[in-house]
Image: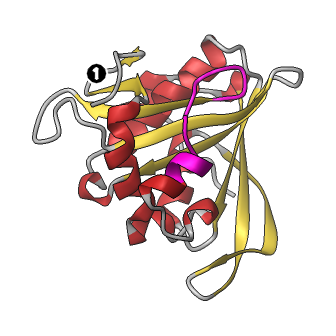
Amino acid sequence: MSGPTFIDGDRIDLQPVDEDDIEFLLKGVNHPKVRQYIGVFRRPYSETRYREELWPIDTDDTGVTLLAAPKSGAFEGKPVGSVQLYPLNEADGSANFGVWFHPSVWGDGYALEASAQLIEYGFEQLRLHRISATTMAPNDDARTLCKRLGFVHEGTARDAQFANGGYVDAERFGLLADAWAGVGSVVDNECAVTEE
């Protein structure tokens, strides 16, 4: 079970990671549908390896990582995904956005809502000017999420990453604070999708 609520949303809360979340995190990073498009998750993680390489997950000056927990339904109070702004660059007012959700909740809108909440926090509380994101070209869901959040496609790095047995392009996106539509607009599907 995740720590206390850090960001209170309508359907989902964002909570700090704690020791009890390691079992969920291992299920996520080892799930084939999650790890296929996240380079750092390519090799299987045992609990020992996870603790050595990725633990602890702190929210501090270097970044923010929070777990999303629905407020009701079958997964009430349980983590279903992770959102992060990492690394944070205070001098430039920038951060990189990352997200993954367990496939059991794909299509429920949790990733969009949790992502919008974290981005709002980044712009409003951390005073970020820019948030970037990079997705592998075959990851249609990640590209769609970026566009629904208001990110603008800024370029393609050809054959920059390896996935599913071959090299794939990396798609780069950016979102500026003055272009951010706000949590309500994004979650209510009022935010216009920015075309490439």
* Depicted 108 relative to depicted 11: above or below: below
* Depicted 16 relative to depicted 154: above or below: above
Which residue corresponds to the image point at 41% horizontal and 72% vertical from the top-left? 32
Which residue corresponds to the image point at 43% horizontal and 54% vertical from the top-left? 47
Residue 96 image point, x, y percent: 70, 40
Residue 62 image point, x, y percent: 72, 27
Q: Is residue 51 magenta?
A: yes
Secondary structure of residue under mark 1:
loop
Which residue corresponds to the image point at 68% horizontal and 28% vertical from the top-left? 179
Residue span colored magenta: 50-63
Nearer to me, 92 or 109: 92
Q: Specify the principal SS of the magenta part.
A: loop
Q: Is residue 188 magenta?
A: no
Nearer to me, 4 or 160: 4
**In the rendered image, which quarter contains the C terminus?**
bottom right
**In the rendered image, which quarter contains the N terminus?**
top left
Residue at the outermost bottom position: 165
Binning the other alpha carbons within 10 Å of mark 1 as few (below 14), some (14 to 19) or many (20 upward) gives few
Q: Is residue 71 left or right of residue 63?
A: left
Q: Amino acid at mark 1?
A: Asp
Residue annotated with mark 1: 10
Residue at the outermost right position: 91
Residue at the outermost front position: 48
Q: Is residue 53 left or right of residue 187?
A: right
Residue 59 visible in the displayed image:
yes
Residue 5 image point, x, y percent: 35, 16
Residue 189 visible in the displayed image:
no
